[in-house]
């Protein structure tokens, strides 16, 4: 025990943090579990792994973040409830599964909202993205950053989707989210909301014909083993939210909060970069794995866009007009990007 009563390890960490230029940073020994929904090799889980490393470095090893990929800590809704209840520390889900907690996040799922990742970054990192994150604390969650899942496409085991009518009648898994259910009903498909953890089994048993996700999710979850066709519909852009339990957040010191916030943003830049690098290779990897991938003709994409537009129009009428105005002005601002 040193003369001033500080334990040797805290002295060490304080020294390290001092070296890092932080004034007397208050960081305690803590273990933090972070869950993801996809396998370890997917950029979302690689982002979570990077986050564990950045936090360890910034906290001189005091904040020990352990990552649990592929829904190892339970289905999406269960993990979200665990954060709200304070029995789990962090989770990195698709924004779509927040629909039942903060309905405004479903605005991110509106069909054909975003054309490319650069637009997505500008929208998520801008005032609209911040307005959504600001709605989480009153529900027991804290949002640190928005990471990338990517443009979503339809895969299925029946036939290539080359025209609007090819979607009709498909039994398709969708995220547990009213916009996705309404979107695929509008396309005359048969949407089945389900946890991502059940998708492979449902496709393998032919209980379902189809699912929709970015190609990287199809690659990482080996959906090419149970899906023959992938059609580049680009019908929605997938956003990932880095969540912390508010019960934990309220116990953290200001330094610990700053450290986790900075780490989530640093890991965000890494995660988006890896996601785009891997996305460039995903199509060839899936073709090599035996999938038949087709572009959908612009005229048919237009027909799909028109078929789902009423879903967006109806949904927009149910939200705070000020938030919808912000979304519209931000979409106008980012529409010139990329
Ligand atoms: O978060 O559930 C989904 O389809 C999500 O895109 C996936 O879990 C990644």
Image (cartoon, grey):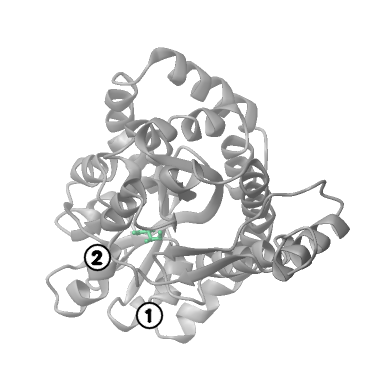
Q: Quadrant of residue 90?
A: bottom left
Q: Which mark is residue 60?
A: none
Q: Which residue is mark 1?
A: 222
Residue in the picture at 39% in, 65% down: 37
Q: Quadrant of ligand 1?
A: bottom left
Place of residue 238 in the rendered image (x, y in percent of width and height, measured from the top left): 45, 51
Residue in the picture at 34% in, 46% down: 84
Question: Is 221 situated left or right of 255 in this image?
Answer: left
Q: Is residue 258 above or below residue 30?
A: above
Q: Quadrant of residue 219?
A: bottom left
Find the distance from the CA under tag 2 to the CA under tag 1: 14 Å
Q: Which residue is mark 2?
A: 210
- Between residue 204 and residue 39, name the one nearer to us: 39
Place of residue 75 in the rendered image (x, y in percent of width and height, measured from the top left): 27, 62
Q: Residue furthest top?
A: 321
Place of residue 118 in the rendered image (x, y in percent of width and height, measured from the top left): 65, 45
Residue in the picture at 37% in, 16% down: 320
- Between residue 213 and residue 37, name the one nearer to us: 37
Q: Report the mark closest to the observer, 2 or 1.
A: 1
Q: Is mark 2 within 8 Å of ligand 1?
A: no
């Amino acid at each position: 025990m040193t003369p001033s009563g500080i334990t040797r390890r805290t002295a060490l960490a304080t020294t390290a943090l001092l070296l890092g230029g932080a004034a007397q940073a208050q960081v305690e020994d803590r273990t933090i579990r972070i869950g993801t929904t996809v396998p370890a090799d997917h950029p979302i889980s690689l982002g979570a792994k990077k986050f564990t490393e950045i936090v360890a470095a910034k906290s001189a090893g005091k904040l020990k973040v352990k990552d649990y990929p592929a829904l190892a800590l339970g289905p999406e809704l269960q993990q979200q409830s665990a954060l709200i209840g304070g029995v789990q520390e962090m989770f990195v889900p698709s924004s779509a599964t927040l629909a039942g907690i903060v309905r405004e996040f479903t605005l991110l799922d509106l069909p054909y909202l975003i054309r490319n990742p650069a637009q997505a970054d500008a929208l998520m990192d801008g005032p609209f993205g911040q307005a959504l994150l600001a709605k989480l604390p009153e529900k027991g969650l804290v949002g640190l950053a928005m990471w990338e899942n990517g443009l979503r496409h339809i895969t299925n085991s029946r036939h290539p989707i080359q025209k609007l009518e090819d979607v009709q009648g498909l039994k398709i898994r969708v995220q547990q989210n009213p916009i996705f259910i309404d979107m695929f009903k509008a396309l005359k498909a048969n949407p089945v909301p389900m946890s991502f953890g059940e998708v492979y089994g449902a496709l393998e048993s032919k209980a379902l014909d189809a699912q929709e996700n970015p190609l990287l999710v199809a690659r990482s979850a080996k959906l090419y083993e149970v899906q023959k066709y992938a059609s580049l519909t680009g019908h929605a852009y997938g956003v990932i939210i880095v969540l912390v339990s508010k019960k934990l957040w309220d116990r953290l010191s200001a330094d610990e909060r700053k450290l986790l916030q900075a780490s989530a943003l640093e890991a965000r830049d890494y995660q988006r970069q890896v996601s785009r690098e891997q996305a460039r290779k995903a199509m060839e990897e899936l073709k090599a794995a035996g999938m038949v991938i087709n572009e959908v003709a612009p005229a048919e994409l237009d027909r799909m866009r028109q078929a789902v537009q009423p879903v967006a129009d109806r949904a927009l009428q149910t939200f705070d007009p000020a938030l919808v105005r912000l979304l519209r002005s931000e979409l106008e601002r980012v529409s010139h990007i990329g």
